[in-house]
Amino acid sequence: MVERTINSMKTAMITGASGFLGNHLLHELLNQGVYVHVISRPSSKRLSRLNGLKNTNIIELDMDDILRLEELMPLQCDVFYHLAWQGGRNDFTTQIPNIKRTMDALEIAYALGCKRFVCTGSQAEYGIHHGLITENTTTNPNTAYGAAKLATCNLSRVRAEQLGIEWIWARVFSVYGPGDNPNSLIPYLLHTLINGQIPSLTQGNHKWDYLYVTDAAKALSVLGNTPHTNQIYNVARGESFPLRWYVERLRDIVAPGSPLGFGLAEGLVVPLEASVEKLKEKTGWQVQVGFDSGVMNTFDYYNNSTFAETKQLNYDN
């Protein structure tokens, strides 16, 4: 395999840049002076997030047609970030096409002369694991989403080695912040508390790891530059507390004294304790945003949006 170390990223390409983490990664790279090519579905409802950005080339192209990219325009990039992913968590029919889309993205990255391919995996690849999760922890996914991510991890690693393109797989754990899926726990809590409602929760005694989205974006950014390639990295805070602690802390910040409905909800309890020692050691990355600050930033975002309007949301954490 040919090793081509990146000393300074000048150009990048991102799929999924109108999504939650992808959009924050885009802004992180732009703040570093990187010129970014963005691939976005023409029908995306979030395409407006990309309007008016400097040093950004927006390419409206469906992921199923990404192999056409080479013929559409001559492009070059140092790093190709692939974050685009679709489908329901337990829907195999919608998850399986993501495997081919990722493999096509890898092929086009190589064809365009990209030196490195960085793809986001997920904590779901590990399945339910009690105890600290390192990159060496046995993978045992229990959802279609986790299984598809793991299959893509293995296939893309082998193909990248054959092509001679640097490969990094970033297993992203639980990320929160402005723009998050409104069905995830923290937006759900903010919504109910803003509206004076009691959130319906499990007992919340299992441990969890929350990472603020800008810290996650910075982690992906440094993985685009690290000389330690062809590896898997966990992307998390690396510090776990009982989920109840996060819930109570958020309540104390945004709505002190509000009642919390622990034990009102039933659901699968999934503990989450992640090690990020490898990420820190290989890249020098460190967490910069504490939970209190992250909650306030997220609260300000949602409190100033239509999110604060009363509507029914589902809780899936």
Image (cartoon, rainbow, N blue to C red):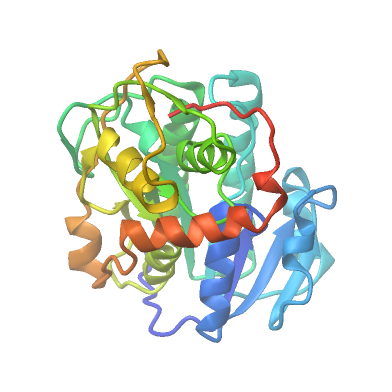
**For this view, does 219 lie left or right of residue 78?**
left
**In the rendered view, would you say 103 is above or below 304?**
above
Name the residue at the front extreme: 257
Identity of the residue drawn at 37% across and 40% down: 257
Front-lying residue, 208 or 253:
253
Q: Is residue 163 visible?
A: no
**In the rendered view, would you say 239 is above or below 10?**
above
Q: Quadrant of residue 284?
A: bottom left
Identity of the residue drawn at 19% across and 43% down: 134
**In the rendered view, would you say 13 is above or below 122?**
below
Across and down, in percent, residue 170 comes to 39, 52
**For this view, does 78 lie left or right of residue 63?**
left
Q: Is residue 123 visible?
A: yes
Q: How many marks?
A: 0
Identity of the residue drawn at 43% across and 85% down: 8
Front-lying residue, 175 or 86:
175
Q: Quadrant of residue 57?
A: bottom right
Across and down, in percent, residue 145 comes to 50, 28
Front-lying residue, 214 or 194:
194
Question: Split into 4 quadrants, where in the image is the N terminus?
Answer: bottom left
Across and down, in percent, residue 136 comes to 19, 40
Across and down, in percent, residue 295 comes to 42, 55
Name the residue at the top extreme: 266
Question: Split into 4 quadrants, where in the image is the C terminus?
Answer: top left
